Image (cartoon, rainbow, N blue to C red):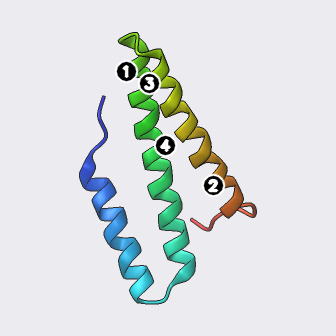
Amino acid sequence: MELREDILQELKEQKQKAIYNQEEWLANELWCLIEVYNIHKNYLAMFQLLKSGKYEEAWRVMDRIDISMGNLRINFVEGIRI
């Protein structure tokens, strides 16, 4: 399974518009959605690596996922408005 790259591109474009329009709350929410997309993408990649027996590479991807999830927790302690 692969994720659609056009979704990521659209999120990035909307985030840039929000930044340009000085809508910080919206830019933050879009950043969150971009991070969730990337976490999902990395999970899929990690499982593919595990299936192919590339355990060390899968471990490194899992570390990136853990860091990304930590960034979400730090930046959205109170939750987001969606």
- Sequence-wise first label, 2 or 4: 4
Give the farthest residue toward the bottom.
21
Quarter of the image with the N terminus in it: top left
Report helix, strand or loop for mark 3.
helix
Query: Label 2 belongs to which residue?
Result: 71
Q: Earlier in the sequence, mark 1 or mark 4?
A: 4
Query: CA–CA distance between discs 1 and 4?
Result: 14 Å
- 17 vs 43, left or right, is left
Task: Determine which residue is flagged by label 4.
Answer: 39
Asked where in the image residue 41 lies, by quadrant, the reply is top left
Q: Secondary structure at mark 4?
A: helix
Dot 2 lies on which element?
Answer: helix
Q: Position of residue 51 (x, y in %)?
A: 39, 12
| Marking on residue 48 | 1
Residue wearing tag 3 = 57
**Disc 1 element:** helix
